Image: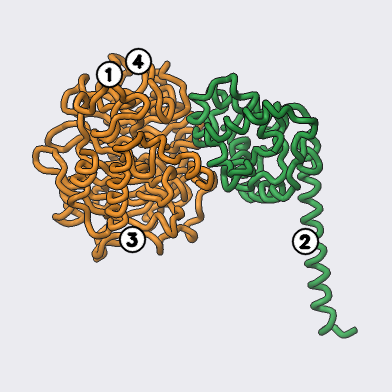
Amino acid sequence: MSAAHSKPVVLILLYAWTSCAWAEALQERIAPCLACHGEHGQSAVPEVPSLGAQTSPYLLIQLFLFREKLRRHEIMNEAVKGFSDDDLRTFADALAKLPPPAPANEAADPARMARGQALVQQYRCNVCHAPDLAGREAVPRIAGQREDFLVKTLREYKTNQRPGYDASMGDVMQPIPDADIPDLAYFSARQ
Amino acid sequence: MQSAGIFSSMRAIGIGLIGFLVVSAAAKAQTQQAADSPPWKQGMPAAIVDSKLAPIAPPPLPTPADKLPLDKLKVKDGFKIEVYAAGVPNARTLRLGDKGTVFVSSRVQDKVHAIVTKDGKREVKVIASGLHRPNGIALHDGTLYIAELSQISRIDKIEDNLDSPPKPTVILDGLPKDEPHGWKYLTVGPDEKLYFQVGAPCNICMPSDRHTKIYRVGLDGKGLEVYAHGIRQIVGMDWHPTLKQLYFSENSRDWLSEDVPEDKLNRVTQPGKDHFGFPYCHQGNFTDPEFGWGRSCSEFTAPVTLVGPHSAALGMKFYTDNGLGDDYRGVLFLARHGSWNRTVKVGGDVLAIKLNDDGTFRSMEPFMTGFIQDNNYVGRPVDVLPMPDGSLLVSDDFNGAVYRVSRAQ
């Protein structure tokens, strides 16, 4: 084989090797995320959110907030410590590609579902989070999210414990009675 | 009454604001409908199902200098726009120090930045961090005042200590901790007191005694008193250069309709007494469908003018220089951040508002436009700052940048 032929081959091999190595490195780095948040986009850990099909802009904002300690959670603050801006973008994009979580599968109580659906419309959750609650842009997917995480988060927004990025959820939750939170979460978790 | 009000506020708008006139026509149509049934009953559920209106969160990371939308932004003929500084995350309020430092606040991040010009080069430095929604900043006699969500602090001799500034010293705390509309605007009055607001902790609600007010307090944090009542949220105040009255922009409620109510430009003429209507009356002539029953807009202080529905009128400054030409001496520049709660976005520009000698409204026209392209934001203006060389700085919290507008030659 002449030198003239070997050059492209080397380049192709080199490219394949680097992109492979990069993918492997990313997979290795993302493994600790999936240990808690779930291998296939679905979390099995209480109050730990599923990240499957979450929107990338929302994930980027949350990763940024954790890095800057503007959202306090010891494990998450530690996990993204020292991440570069590019790391944040890479992780947000990669996590957004996980498959969507399956809706909570035990038999749903039709009365609660009806109540939840009415509340979702009354409070216009479906306007920002999209009619199927799959989210879009910086507004997160809440369809199929863990019910316990949704209840916890909505309460944190209502009581100003979770400031949020731009405070829009605090605004939304202010007039919503605490008694409506469980049904909102119940419905959303089953979409 | 209402459409007449909207019309009169629009009468002097320049030709660049044609979209706005369409809005005003739509508002008129809306008003005629509203005579038959309350607006909140008008087909809301059906209309909302396909609606995609949501607050637009600014990206957390600033846009690199070479990706800023300079080619999209427009100023009137004879002026030019350049980048003053890029990489200023979530750039919000702009303030100028006596030694030429430009201070920039943020709302969704925890820092205050300083832009320093040295040997023709600009450097962006963090001068305070670990703050909670430090949107309000003001400078007075060399001291930087920072208004966070629920407290106000100060750093003395800030421009002598830009490389290693001390931590801010809290002078006033215990303000309400509500996140909605909790971020503050801060200004120093001709009486050498700090002025700031506590906004409504909601879109629309009956506020507590502590909310929906403008307060003033001494530079030492003592002597807190109410300066005005009935405001929903304020992100821009300035003092009329000759009348010495406080002018401020006010953001009106959402989710009532596409076109009503409009945001307002207000002024305080009766300190301690003026009530601007929230939550009973919006835009000076429209009682709230829930809280307005039994009330009349005539009970409240009327706006100076209306500045567009959901347009998010934010930072504003009187321009007393003549560096932009005689046409602009004495105008009020007002940045409109732009709407989210409206199908066709409005705002996303800087208006030049002219007032009569008695401080009443004369005319307004767009000065800087282009932040909205194809009904999407390429940037969002927040505050304006007249500079000693006659130019005007404009902050953009969407891109984390500060622009400079000056005469072209």
Q: Nearer the viewer, residue B7 or A109?
A: A109
Q: Nearer the viewer, residue B364 or A25?
A: B364
Residue B118 visible in image: no
How many C-alpha atoms fall within 10 Å of the one at disc 2: few (<14), some, or many (≥20)?
Answer: few
Residue drawn at x 24%, y 66% is B409
Vertical arrangement, residue A138 with respect to residue A181, above or below: below
- Residue, disc 4: B209
Q: Where residue B170 sits in the image (x, y, percent)?
A: 41, 20
For the rendered model, the colour scheme is: by chain
User: Helix, strand or loop at disc 3?
Assistant: strand
- Residue, disc 3: B74
The answer to whether tags 2 and 4 share a subunit is no
Residue drawn at x 33%, y 29% is B288
| Mark 4 / mark 3, whichever is N-terminal | 3
- Chain letter, colour green in render: A
Determine the CA span between mark 2 and mark 3.
42 Å
Q: Nearer the viewer, residue B312 or B43?
A: B43
Residue drawn at x 38%, y 40% is B257
Determine the CA span between mark 2 and mark 1.
63 Å
Q: Nearer the viewer, mark 4 or mark 1?
A: 4
The answer to whether tags 1 and 3 share a subunit is yes
How many C-alpha atoms fall within 10 Å of the one at disc 1: few (<14), some, or many (≥20)?
Answer: some
